[in-house]
Image: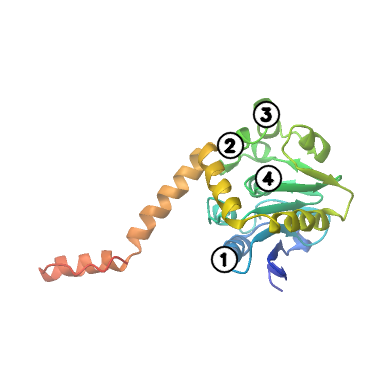
Amino acid sequence: MPVVTVEDRGAVSIIRINRPERLNAINQAVAVELQAAFQAFDADAGKRVAILGATGTRAFTAGADVDDIPELWRAVPTVGFTTDKPIIAATAGWVVGGGIVLAMMCDLLVATEDTQFYYPEAKLGVTAGGISSLAARMPHHLAMEVMLLGAKIPARRAYDVGFVNRVVPAGAHEAEALAMAEQLLDSAPLVIGALKRLVNDVMPTGPIERMVATSQTVARVRQSDDLQEGIRAYKEKRKPRFAGR
């Protein structure tokens, strides 16, 4: 059974975490496959809007799978992948730990009335740090209440402070997200993309986002054919023939 599924609805892709038996906990495979699914969505000229959801209604995700810790950054919009196309998060039930990071980095957010945002990492003695960007997406003191006190924030409170765009009855989150997607399809994609890029320039970039971007830049060099060619040329005492790849 795939841990990430993709459903096509015309120009809309619904990308779902598919581990309901583990409350959609994000393991390494989920992180890698989410990244790949969104990269494929971005590369497909026929797709214009993505919805990030999950199978079942008990949890959008229980966060990182402690039995198979993922490289969560891979699945995070603007960090593990970039796209000018809008992404709508559709959540139900528990949104825990890294799940908040995934949801907050989407462009729009729909939540069911039973959605609960919960970040327990301070109680567990672990953090990857990506949650720090929450302070740029909800009022500072409430963000600190989530991070430091491990407060559970219900959908209505998240809506009241502007963190959530829509609160809907149980089971209606994907339908509402699809309705929003249809509205987006009526707009000019070049304008949508331009506005998203401009907004991303305005939004503060957190330290983990910067660290990942730097690591990816360095990794591209370390994994390049040019590096291997440079080493060979040095050993063979000749001029290297770099190809830029």
What's the colour scheme?
A: rainbow
Q: Quadrant of the N terminus?
A: bottom right
Residue beneath label 2, please?
132
Label 3 Cα crowd, 10 Å radius (few <14 / some 14-19 / many 20+): few
**Which label lies toward us, 3 or 4?**
3
Which quadrant would residue 187 be assigned to in this image?
A: bottom right
Label 1 Cα crowd, 10 Å radius (few <14 / some 14-19 / many 20+): some
What amino acid is labelled 3 in the image?
Answer: Pro
Which sits earlier in the primary sequence, circle 4 or circle 2? Answer: 4
Q: Residue 195: horizontal and vertical position, in percent?
A: 57, 46
168, 198: nearer the viewer: 198
What amino acid is labelled 4 in the image?
Answer: Ile
Report how far apart the C-alphas of labels 4 and 1 lie in the structure: 20 Å
What amino acid is labelled 1 in the image?
Answer: Ala
Label 4 Cα crowd, 10 Å radius (few <14 / some 14-19 / many 20+): many
Residue beneath label 3, please?
139
Residue beneath label 4, please?
100
**Which label lies toward us, 2 or 1?**
1
Residue beneath label 1, please?
36
The local secondary structure at tag 2 comes to: helix
Residue visible at 70% across and 29% down in the picture: 142
